Image (cartoon, rainbow, N blue to C red):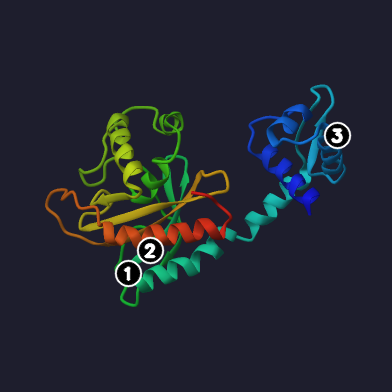
Amino acid sequence: MPALRRGLAVLRLLAGRPGPLSAAAVARELSLPRSTTYHLLAELTAAGFATHFPEERRYGLGVAAFELGSAYLRHDPLERLARPVLRRLVDSVGRTAHLGVLHGAEALYLVREQPRQPTTIVSDVGVRLPAHLTASGRAMLARLPAAQVRALFPGGPFVDRTGRGPRNLPALRRLLSVERRRGWAVEDGYVTAGFASVAAPVFDHGERPIAAITVTFRHVCEVECGETWPELAVEIRRAADELTGRIGGRG
């Protein structure tokens, strides 16, 4: 079992770095003896889970790791794990809930669960919306590095649907800062007039925002009211934390 844990730790380290690592770097990062590190890397390489680059004296992920990742994606694990969590959330709050992910500068909706008396809303499965306008998009953007947000929104006026929401990068940054401190994101008529949403992020094992859970509901306000729906946010954050745990993530 210790050998298995160490081997998995090596794979996780290789997966989390942008390029190959030397055996010395692996040993240092994981506090492993050099002899143990070389043995683990040799076994992982023989099994195809690691690749040795002899000219560079470094190691990276192998084809077998890619095959495992591809198989994982084919089984739609995130959607499968999220659906019962969303169902329990909908039964608790009586409103429509979604699971969304970032797709570039857009929020892509993967799962929707509805109450017994559903309301027609634009955020259906497969729909993409500007991430800066959606609560789900900003719940994830708020946990990304500033440089990554800047790369997603390089400049120019932002897409506007209803006359509400951030119009440029400085305004988006200010809003993300508030939402990061608060712990959840809110949109009040940014996407569709007469509807509001509250969202919380879901994290992977590296504490990166991999998805967001959103609840959408009717809310008519002639101007942006400044409401943040903290009681509803408690329920949504609890569901997001549950899904984070189900996928082995850390928030």
Q: Residues within 10 Å of mark 3 (few under 14, many from 20)?
A: few
Which mark is nearer the camera, 2 or 1? 1
Residue 249's x, y, as percent?
Answer: 55, 52
- Tag 3's secondary structure? helix
Residue depicted at 79% across the width and 44% down the height:
49
In the picture, measured across the screen, residue 118 lies left or right of residue 29, that is left
Residue 59's x, y, as percent?
Answer: 77, 32
Q: Which residue is mark 2?
A: 97
Gap in angstroms between the C-alphas marked 2 and 1: 9 Å
Residue depicted at 83% across the width and 22% down the height:
55
Of residue 88 and residue 151, the one placed in the foreground of this image is 88
The residue at the far bottom in this view is 116
**Badge number at residue 93:** 1
Say which amino acid is labelled 3: Ser
Which mark is nearer the camera, 2 or 3? 3
Gap in angstroms between the C-alphas marked 3 and 1: 55 Å
Residue 132's x, y, as percent?
Answer: 34, 42
The answer to whether marks 2 and 1 mark residues whose Cβ atoms lie closer than 8 Å is yes
Residue depicted at 43% across the width and 71% down the height:
88
**Badge number at residue 35:** 3
- Tag 2's secondary structure? strand
Say which amino acid is labelled 1: Val
Residue 130 visible here: no
Say which amino acid is labelled 2: Ala
Residue depicted at 23% across the width and 51% down the height:
188
Image quadrant where one finds the N terminus: bottom right
The answer to whether marks 3 and 1 mark residues whose Cβ atoms lie closer than 8 Å is no
Which mark is first along the chain, 1 or 3?
3
Q: Residues within 10 Å of mark 2 (few under 14, many from 20)?
A: many
Q: Residues within 10 Å of mark 1 (few under 14, many from 20)?
A: some
